Amino acid sequence: SRGWGLEKVVRTSKFRHVFGQAVKADQCYDDIRISQMTWDSNFCSVNPKFVAMIVDASGGGAFIVLPLSKTGRIDMSLPTVCGHTGPVLDIEFCPHNDNIIASCSEDCSVMIWEIPDGGLISPLKDPVVKLDGHSKRVGILSWHPTAHNVLMSAGCDNVVILWNVVHGEAVVRIDSMHTDLIYSACWNRNGSQILTSCKDKKLRVIDPRKGSVICEKDKPHEGSRPVRAVFVSDGKILTTGFSRMSERQVALWDPNNFSEPLTLQELDTSSGVLLPFFDPDTGVVYLCGKGDSSIRYFEVTDEAPYVHYLSMYSSKESQKGMGYMPKRGLEVNKCEIARFYKLHERKCEPIVMTVPRKSDLFQEDLYPDTIGPEPSLEADDWFAGKNGEPILISLKDGFVATTKNKEFKVIKSLMATTSSSSSNRQSDSVVREQKESSALMCFI
């Protein structure tokens, strides 16, 4: 019986020994003036081709986009994406096209940009599409996970807008639901629901096309500081927030029974908002506090207490923001299960999370088929009511894009496309063809 008791204490998990390690100094991105704006977004977005970071800009807003391989000291004169007239507050790469990135700003606009392979050679001032619909600054962006060219934005006007980016059109406008500042907004796995946290102390699960509340929770955390919320496995919801005594907390909820949390754990008394990053393939959630110098990680399972502390990556310097690499951009032969891009005041430092394994063979248990870059359906179909599950890919041989590369095109009358050659152009109003990749694009 003594052995049985010990068994209960030490929970078996293949992620118990995950460890974080910063890369060597020459693999960092140095001499970048990261934005000083006080705003609780990631300030960084990354994919298998590029890393993008919001930077300080006088007289407007700018962000920098670098090819992943362009490490070392970054020249001050390197061109930026600088079309916003106010500070940039959030950026996010499109999950279905690594050359497309969205940005939003204090200037009340959302802009869509196309980054050429190899990065910028001159300042980029003109977006492919400009989306105007908010009356106050826009602080949150999130691309739809499975529908092509659907983007969600949330502004300080307490409005959530769902855009059909190809048409440059605000198709759904949720403007009377949130009575105060929206802290976070995200999609579920297939993009059939959105989840918001708000200063009015409500957590809402929303039907995005009807613009109606499916269910809501009052005061998921008692404190008055910002709450963050993400969907995790099986439709459950993980939140971070603060107690009445300003202690930081993490909680797990079942939206079918919102009355009590499945678990609510107190972490510490730091003041930074905890940004959650959930990996559906491993069930691991990483909590990165803005201003913290650590990343805590937990495993979310079906067994009480549901959110199990694994470990913590600690360093000396605090983080100003954090980028999170999609799974298809990781080095599977090194048993890398996550890679973060930690922003310091003057640099970006990749941090690699690894499961120690003796064999250098492909570890199938660590890498189930994962979300690939191919969308399941087009924007018009999604807005018409269809849903599409993520199209999964195997990482066994390292991810190589063998499918056609989605080309980003918009309505002719709205704006000419930046990437199609004259021979490729069509007079039709909307072109949604796929452009053949001229060569296989290796993402690893």
Image: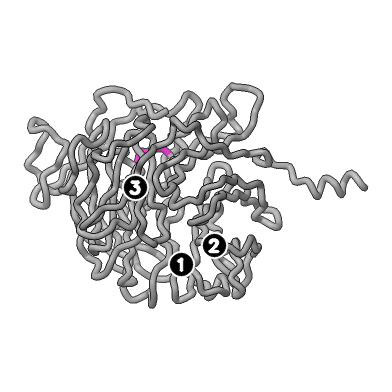
Residue 63 forms part of the magenta stretch:
no
Give the residue drawn at x 73%, y 42%.
Answer: 12
The residue closer to the viewer here, 309 or 344, is: 344
Which is more toward the observer, 280 or 356?
A: 356
Q: Where is residue 362 in the image (x, y as percent from the top left)?
A: 56, 25
Disc assigned to residue 239? 2
Q: Is residue 224 left or right of residue 245?
A: left
**Dot 3 amino acid type:** Arg
Which residue is most to the right?
1
Q: Few, some or many C-alpha atoms within 10 Å of disc 2 (few <14, some 14-19, many ≥20)?
A: many
Magenta-highlighted residues: 372-376
Query: Is 194 rendered above or below residue 14?
Result: below
Question: Disc 1 to disc 2, how far (Cα)?
Answer: 9 Å
Residues at circles 1 and 2 in contact by the CB criterion of under 8 Å = yes
Residue 244 location, quadrant: bottom right
- What is the x, y in percent for residue 94? 32, 45
Main secondary structure type of the part rendered in magenta: loop
Residue 108 rendering spot, x and y as whole percentages: 24, 64
